[in-house]
Amino acid sequence: MTAEARTPLEELPGEVMMWVLIVSELLVFGAGLAAFLGVRIADPAGFAAAQDTLHRTAAGVNTLVLVTSGYLAARATLWAGDLRHGRSALALVTAAALGVAFVVLKALEFRDLAMQGIGTETHAFYTFYFLLTGFHAAHVVAGVLILLLVAVWNSHRNVEVAGSFWHMVDLVWVLLFPVIYLLR
């Protein structure tokens, strides 16, 4: 007896439509980052000066928060697969709580910049900064809601799908953080 051959799409964890969403979101963020880098070439000094107003430490903490959250989402997937749904749900709720912490830190950073009179019209850097990080924060909020829903309707398949989305959110931040906050 031979095993039925599986297509590459059937090998993906979760649902194909979630992967369509993930790929499309990665393309959107990739285009935004490419535009950011393209405009930066024309004004490296202005971008560097604007970048110096950002809170690199808070962004670094946010990176640790999201990576830890991603780890918990991965553990939740393993535990759901082993039918340890209680542990899986707890990991998902904790991952969601870390997502909320990320959004709170990001909101505080936005507020601080606004209090300095900095907005999307201040400089091209800030236009990209607010658009890219704000769009990412919206994805974090969506991901938090997905994680909480899946913590309630906890099955291996559901956790796998939610985890795939959450890892995309992590990946995007791991790309945004160095380009926006560190690249000189």
Image (cartoon, rainbow, N blue to C red):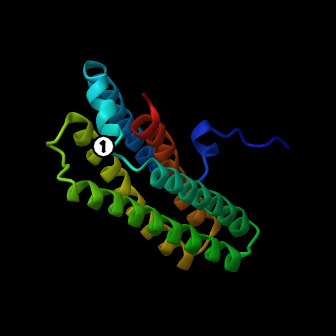
Residue 158 vs residue 5: left or right?
left
In the rendered structure, which amino acid carries the disc numbered 1? Tyr
Q: Specify the farthest residue to the top.
A: 42
Residue 17 coordinates in the image, percent (x, y): 45, 50
Q: Quick one: 38 or 48, which is closer to the camera?
A: 48
3 in relation to 68, above or below: above
Q: Is residue 86 left or right of residue 158?
A: right
Residue at image coords 46%, 44%: 172
Q: Position of residue 164 (x, y in %)?
A: 55, 53
Most distant residue in the left direction: 121
For the C terminus, the image quarter is: top left
**Quarter of the rendering containing residue 152:** bottom right
Query: Quarter of the image holding residue 73?
Result: bottom right
Point 74% across, 73% down: residue: 83
Residue 41 in the image: state x and y as whole percent.
31, 20
Q: Nearer the viewer, residue 6 or 137?
A: 137
Q: Is residue 178 left or right of residue 115?
A: right
